[in-house]
Amino acid sequence: MTNILDVQALKTEFRRKNTLIRAVNNISFTIKKGSVLSIVGESGSGKSVTMHSVLRLIPSTGKIVAEKINFMGRDLMRLTEKEMRKIRGDQISMIFQDPMSSLNPTIKIGRQISEVLLWHHKANPKEAKERTIRMLHEVGIASPIERYNQYPFEFSGGMRQRVMIAMALIGEPRLLIADEPTTSLDVTVQAQILALIKKMQEQNKMSVVLITHNLAVATMMADEMIVMYAGQIVEQATKAEFLNRASHPYTVALLGSTPKLNMKERLQSIPGQPPDLKNINLEGCPFVDRCSAKMERCSREEPPAVQLSPTHRIRCWLYT
Amino acid sequence: MEPVIERMLEVQNLKKYFSVGKQLLKAIDDVSLEVKTGQSVGIVGESGSGKSTFARLVLGLLEATDGNVFFMESIAVQPMKKNNRSMTLRKYAQIVFQNPYLSLFPHLTIGANIEEPLRIHGVRDKEKRHLRAQELMYKVGVPEAYYDAFPHELSGGQQQRVAIARALALNPKLIVFDEPVSSLDVSIQAQILNLLLDLKEQYRLTYVFIAHDLAVVEYISDVIAVMYLGRFVEYAPKRFLIDQPLHPYTNVLLESVPVVGGSLKDVAGRGEIPSPLSPPSGCPFHPRCTKAFDRCRLERPEFIEVKPNHWVACHLYT
Amino acid sequence: MGEFTIPVNKNIDSGGKPPSAEHSDKTTRRSYFGVLWRRFKRNKISLISLYFIVFLIALAIVGPLILPFDYKTMDYTALYQKPSLKHWMGTDDGGRDMLTLIIYGLRNALIVGFGAGLVEILIGVTIGALAGYFGGRLDNILMRFVDIMFALPSFLLSLMLVVVLGRNLFTILLAIGLTSWAGMARLARAQVLSIKQVDYIEAARSLGASNSVIIFRYVLPNAVGPIFVSLSFNIPGAMMVESGLSLIGLGIMPPMPSWGALINIGSRFILSTPHLILYPAITFALTILAFTFVGDGLRDAFDAKQSD
């Protein structure tokens, strides 16, 4: 299988007053055509900034450096802003956590969706409307013809997220970035939306990057997994490897601290606080303060990338 | 010696209606519950189920439309009397909110925040308050050096620890938690949940634990009540509720809990919680229920005890 | 899970470093206002402006005591003099020392500005806070009254009040204060309304705090930010109303100088002796500007999202 996206040595830094915040610190990963990659991390892990950097959608205080960001044979780092705009929303589209703030409250949802097609000159107005109505039906919105002419406030939270998905998918993108798409939704609705994203992914044979803080959600959707901590990838693996042999102490601890039904034992908790990117230890491993398996060298030397299998890589001194 | 109190909290036919324009919103509609001393009762529900309103009603922060709430057997919380602030209630019943940043006093230091309940309850001795605050900070695991910090300088997890310390300051008997961990990171969530379990054991506390996440509720609680559109639809000891759920809604909730390594079940078509302003006729869950039959559309099922201590409101069991 | 299991500390952990080293220093108890002051200091222009205002206040107090001239005595031997060693800012059309007049004008402007501001705060915040906190009928009644006050042209109203009450410093500041508190009341109400919604007020109620404790200890300290910011813009506003009144001859009674009157007179001689308008106008503008900059600094300092 070929890669749809190949990111090498990506760094994103923000400068605030006199402090340098390394939000994404030298990470490399690939996404295969037609597969789902889940990026898991807690706050400050850089999971969101990573994908925003790929799309070059970060605040002006930020700086992106990368060896390459290759998307379907083109290096996104070398494209002009105008060329980037053609890619965003067309070949790569995004859905966000809060569907209400991503939709324009004053424009009927049908028009908001069909405009995507018109911007990218993919259809004439009549076709655009037809395709929009078909898409609304696809994402599970009942009576799409009437719904076409309604405003965002007339939709419930789950329905709005369906509208967002319709809008993201109408241009038939090759890559969908879903940034915490179900975090603000109720659990029963979350399950429906995840199933919908999976269905659309399989149907359109597109690739999906799912950004989430929820390990369970991540594993349910993924073909491949990435775990991030303090701007670094600490573990990446296929789903099967992840479920059978999760190895990085952070990943193991994160699995242990996720509440499950029918738990007999106590939750494992990770001591300490989420990383403070303003004063992160750049010498050693960023997780060292919270790690229960830390060794002396962990706080002095940056852990190397260790290949546990061709597809399973972690950054930890334990496995050297 | 204090008399032994068996029933920490009794809720009888509690109702809370809000008028929204010309419509009536039944946020809580005829809910009864008994919380025994030392018990931990979990209330699980999705947004719009009325669970937060319930928390405020049982603590007398909101006036009920109808029904009774008794605290420690003798204190009538509802119906609320005008201008009667029961200091016993305020001392022995506490609440911890979802967002600790919004629930801490932003203009007071961490130390002052924790000492505030003591001030309100007339502890004048500064040194005594200070010592108590330090003791509580130690108990909940907030470094002493934070005493003079302000809430916004702490991480979310630390803020929630401070909020818990503040709730413990007066040696309460009952603590109501309203989504206490849903705004926290997973690793911090586990810390706080374990802390809550430890504190409960250490101080023999009684908990009412409200959350939308069934796995979290199960971890903390002994018994679980499932709330849907302002009513309980199922109530049982957690073992029975999780292993042998009776109500179809409880089933949907259980199936929807994401599981590490689990597969995506096809739960599409089950829709969303309807607006409480226009609840469906009959059983409020019937439009989403795969087992609904004619009677469900017409008649509201009673909440009945179908097995010992296992209550359900569903026509499948009548 | 996997073949590797890592032991995890089950103790209640604490972890994390305190925000900065200074907090561990027990001798320096930090206060809310200490933090505000530290944040305010970071904005240099605001800080300089604040020092400037302090200097002006000192000047207004000390100036009249040490100045060799007074504002009343005319000196017909020294009309329209250009700045000199004796008269640093020259003299006016009555031969009076301009510097003396400006300092007296400054004193009057500050008294009117702060006085009117105080009146606005007392009335506006009281009414706004009561309306916002208790809501319901009280809110309705109070806010309709505020609406009426808002609808009336405040300049004309203060003009009428001055005519009725007489023309001295106190009646003028009262007239300005009494007619311009409506905005403050609305602001205070909006603040109280939004703070009332925040969880910590509910937390205070659940802890047993009484209404008055809640208002004075939790609501108002968190509402003062925008109120002080607004005050720092209203003080120069009141000064301008006072000069406006003076400009049309209804301000402070001559010969007591007022900036408005000075500018009014100076404008008549703008071509022949420009220093008569230049000096009062510049000091006036600088003073107004300083208050505005302080307001900006306050707004930033009160913004809790800022880090320390």
Image (cartoon, coloured by chain):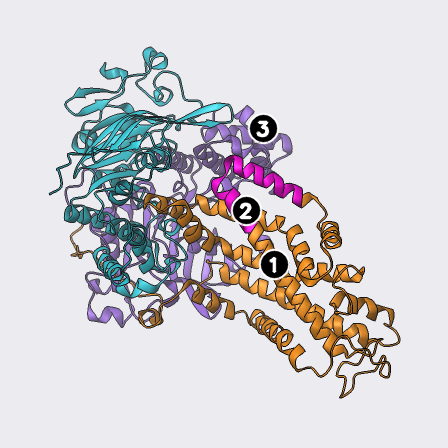
Image chain in cyan: B
Q: Is residue B116 above or below residue B32?
A: below
The local crowd at label 1, few if under 14, some if 14 to 19, many if 20 or more residues have their Cα within 10 Å, is: many
Mark earlier in primary sequence (1, 2): 1
Q: Amino acid at mark 1?
A: Gly
Q: Which residues are magenta?
A: C124-149
Is disc 2 placed on a helix, strand or loop?
A: helix
Q: Residue at x 69, y 43 (%)?
A: C151
Q: Which mark is residue A149?
A: 3
Dot 3 and dot 2 residues touching (CB under 8 Å): no
Q: Is residue A169 left or right of residue A248?
A: right
Residue at x 72% of width, y 61% of height: C242
Q: Amino acid at mark 2?
A: Gly
Residue B200 or residue A271, whichever sits in front: B200
**In this orientation, which residue lies closer to the viewer: A58 or A53?**
A58
The picture's colour for chain A is purple
Magenta stretch contains residue C136: yes
Q: CA distance from mark 1 to mark 2?
A: 15 Å
User: Looking at the image, which residue sits at the far left?
Assistant: B1
Q: Main secondary structure of the magenta part?
A: helix
| Left/right of residue B65 with respect to residue A265 in the rendered view | right
Looking at the rendered structure, the kind of residue marked 3 is Asn
Disc sitting over residue C117 in the figure = 1
Task: Say if C98 sits above or below C173 in the image.
Answer: below
Residue nearer the viewer, C79 or A137:
C79
Q: Position of residue A277 (x, y in %)?
A: 38, 63
Task: Please identify the quarter of the rendering in which residue B262 is found.
Answer: top left
Image mark 1: chain: C
Q: Is residue B301 left or right of residue B199?
A: right
Give how far across and how far down residue C52 sits, in percent. Answer: 61, 74
Which residue corresponds to mark 2? C128
**Residue B239 falls within the magenta-colored stretch:** no
